[in-house]
Each structure stands twice: as structure tokens, then as C-alpha cells.
Image: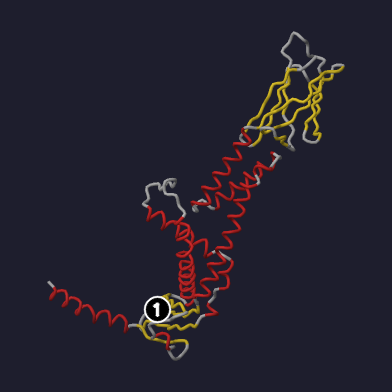
Amino acid sequence: MKKNLIIFILSFMPLFVMAQKDYKLVDQFPKDKPIWMTEGMHKGYLFKQANQMPTIEDAQNAVMSSLLNDIASSVSVVVTGGIVDIIDWDLVELDGKTKEEYVQTIEKNTTTKIANMPAFQGISLSKADVYYEHYVHKKTKESYYDYYILYPFSDIELQELIDTYNAQEKVINDKIDNYKNILDDIDEIDVLLENISQMRTLKEEYKDDYTKYAELESIITMYNDVIKEIYIEILENYNNDNTGTLEIQLKYAEKIMKTNSLPQLRSKCARDFNMRHDGYKIILNFNTFDCFEQDDNYVEVRFNFGKRKLSKKININL
């Protein structure tokens, strides 16, 4: 069996050599092949190559893509280790993946995010040593390029990219923490709703980042819990010469909440509504000429705060 395999390989080798000989080297740059092309080790450098590319532009794009991915992966390996260390696997929904596959997804997404950092805009072929060869088929005149680069990339530069990534992440983490830290001090419903909207946008942006996604989801729930507990408090309810007046305010626990919105009003008898803000209060005036004591006289006050529909029926004092 081994003998037959050896005979097959030996018989195939001349065909491969002949295929190579069908192409002629017509150009190379620089004219003398650099020493780094034959050296095995390139400490402080990254060696990348793209072979048999149809155009020199394709070759350049291929080595640049490989270079950027290689650098991003080097950063990702370091920072992903920190992410994985703090994962609570009891809370992770693996969706059929193994832990290893889940970590691979994190590494892939982190690599993509790193490659899009502004710091990567400075990586270009102008900083690399370049060598390429141009081959043309002797009969068909088809051609291809073999393209090689040696890009300077030291441990110091790697650490600078890691530090840049960590600084960028700190800005986002601080922003997320701030949403949580300021919640108890917020006394405006519009701010609650705006922050929820911002966090939902941020959550979508970081849907592949378990830690950030889970933290944002938790904080959004906290905000919604506050909105669910807001209620309408009646401050004044009186009627004078067929003109009814209601003064109301919104509260969460004992905290007075402000809103820029005015409520929707509904009544079977009251009409000609007029509403205005007075600080944290909302003052409602209306005509009660068609309201009679024997009837069910009320004003229904309704607010829409996102998904929360807050309403209260308030009896009209005649």
C-alpha cells in the first residue's frame, strides 16, 4: 500500500512541476529578493502573504485583510480572556452551543469590534516592507501575483491597542453604570423614557456582548419598574359657577414626578377642557354645566408613558 502511494506521488510530481513551469516570472519588486523572505523568524514584525492573486490590487487587499485580522485577533485573545473570566455560566442562554462555541463567538465578535476601532486606521501598507512577483502563463497570457509584506508590530504596539480598547470599553461601561446610578435621583418621567430608549439602542449595538447586553436589560427592567409604580395624586377638586378645577400630580412612592406631557381627558358631562402645567402640578379646568348630581360625573385622566397606560377616574365635585 505504502509502495503504491509513493509511486502515485512520484508520478504526480512531474505534472505539478510542469504546471509551475507554464508560468514565467516577468516582474518582481524589488529586483533583489529581500533577506526577510528567506528568514524563518520575524521578531517584532508580522509576515503576511497572498498568492496567485489576479491583480496587484487584489493581492494588496488580501494581505491587508489578513494583517488587520491578525492584529485584531492578537488584541482579542487578551481582552476576551477578561470577559470570559467574569461570565456567570448559570445565567447564560447557550442556545444549543457548547461553552467553547460560545467563547469562540465572543472572540469573533470582539475581533470584529477591535478591527473597527479608529486606532486601526493608521495601519497601512506604507509602513510595511513589500515584495511581490508577477507571473504570466506562457501560452494563455493569464497572470497572477504573489505578494508578501513584513509589517512592524512590536509588543509595545500590541499593548497600546489593548489599552485603547480597554479605554474605549471603560467609556461604555461607565455610561451603562451611570444609567443605573442616577435612577434614584431622576424625578422626570421624560428622562426615564429617554434613558430607556438610549439603553435599548445601546443594547442592540452590544447584542453579541453578553455582559453589556445582560446589564442593560437588567437596568431597563429597573426603569420600567419605576414607571409601572407611578400613580396620579389628586391635590384639588372643586367646582365654582359651573367651572370645575382639578389639580393633580404624578408620584412614585413619595417622590413627585414631573412630565412635559399633558393627559388625555374623557368625561360624559364635562367639556371645554383647558390644561396647563404649574411646576410639577397639572391644572385642569372644564365646564360642568351638563353635569347633574344624580349622574355618574367623572373625568378620566389618561397618560401614555411608553408601554405604560396610566389612568384614573376622578369624580367631579358639584
Quarter of the figure with residue 262: top right
Q: Is residue 84 left or right of residue 290?
A: left
**In the depicted view, which residue is nearer to us: 114 or 7?**
114
In the displayed structure, 46 sits above or below 177; it is: below
In the displayed structure, 305 sits above or below 29; it is: above
Query: What residue is pinned by disc 1?
Result: 142
- Picture mark count: 1
Quarter of the figure with residue 272: top right
Residue positioned most to the front: 254
Please provide percent x and percent y for residue 231: 67, 29
Q: Quadrant of the C terminus?
A: top right
**In the depicted view, which residue is nearer to us: 249 or 205?**
249
- Label 1 amino acid? Glu
**In the depicted view, which residue is nearer to us: 73 or 61?**
73
Image colouring: secondary structure
Q: Is residue 263 left or right of residue 85?
A: right
* Residue located at (47% from left, 88% from top): 30
Q: Quadrant of the N terminus?
A: bottom left
* Residue located at (48% from left, 51% from top): 210
Please provide percent x and percent y for residue 232: 70, 28
Provide the secondary structure element on which disc 1 rests.
loop
Residue positioned most to the top: 294
Please provide percent x and percent y for residue 24: 37, 86
Residue positioned most to the right: 241
